[in-house]
Amino acid sequence: MDDKLTVAEALKHARHDFLNKLQLIKMHADLGKTDRISGLIRDFADMAQVQNCLARLEMPETEEWLLTAGWRFQDIEFRLECAGKEGAPPHDAVIRDSLEKLFVSVCEEMDGGTEAVCTLRMCGDKEPFCLEITLDGITPAVPDAPDGNLEMKWMQSAAPAVLRITPKTEG
């Protein structure tokens, strides 16, 4: 799938998403549902905070992959969380490549009408950087890390499965 989006394509998707959000706000305004409008604005602000957190991790290739994955893998609803203050910049490209392999595999395992929900959580506040991936209903094979410098393992066998990706430590 490694179809990298051009800047123009990414902006097209971003404009579409932005217009959808404006239409939701207008619809709720027309219906007089101001409480729902407040909730939507809060959700949009929370997503902006997640995006700022991703930028602070100084992993631009992983950040780009995470922010465009929903446009490329449209059968998967991606939910992003970021609690990290420290990324793993030396492992940026290999993490991006591993995510790509994993989600190509996930899409191959899904049947045509299935939609999946995936939560991607970046950790690294009090512990070393890690990426936790929760997939509802799907437990694909773990791809090999391209350079062998990542540890990737399922944290539980029952659904939802959690895949934890961490840089290998010396020693």
Image (tube, helix red, strand yellow):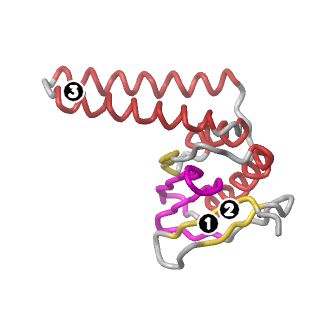
Gap in angstroms between the C-alphas marked 2 and 1 = 6 Å
Q: Is residue 88 above or below residue 13?
A: below
Identify the image quadrant of residue 40.
Answer: top left
| Neighbourhood count class around disc 1 (C-alpha, 10 Å): few under 14, some 14–19, many 20 upward | some
> 6 or 83, which lies in front?
83
Gap in angstroms between the C-alphas marked 1 and 3 = 38 Å
Which label lies toward us, 1 or 3?
Answer: 3
Q: Is residue 66 above or below residue 18?
A: below
Extent of the magenta region: 111-140
Mark 2 vs 3: CB contact within 8 A:
no
Please name the amino acid that badge 3 sits on: His
Residue 24 in the image: x percent, y percent? 30, 27
Please name the amino acid that badge 1 sits on: Glu
Residue 91 in the image: x percent, y percent? 78, 50
Q: Which residue is mark 1?
A: 109
Gap in angstroms between the C-alphas marked 2 and 3 = 39 Å
Residue 120 shown in magenta: yes
Q: Is residue 136 above or below residue 5?
A: below
Q: Which residue is mark 2?
A: 105
> 155 or 58, which lies in front?
58
Residue 31 in the image: x percent, y percent? 15, 25
Q: Which residue is mark 3?
A: 28
Image quarter of the C terminus: bottom right
Q: Is residue 25 above or below residue 107?
A: above
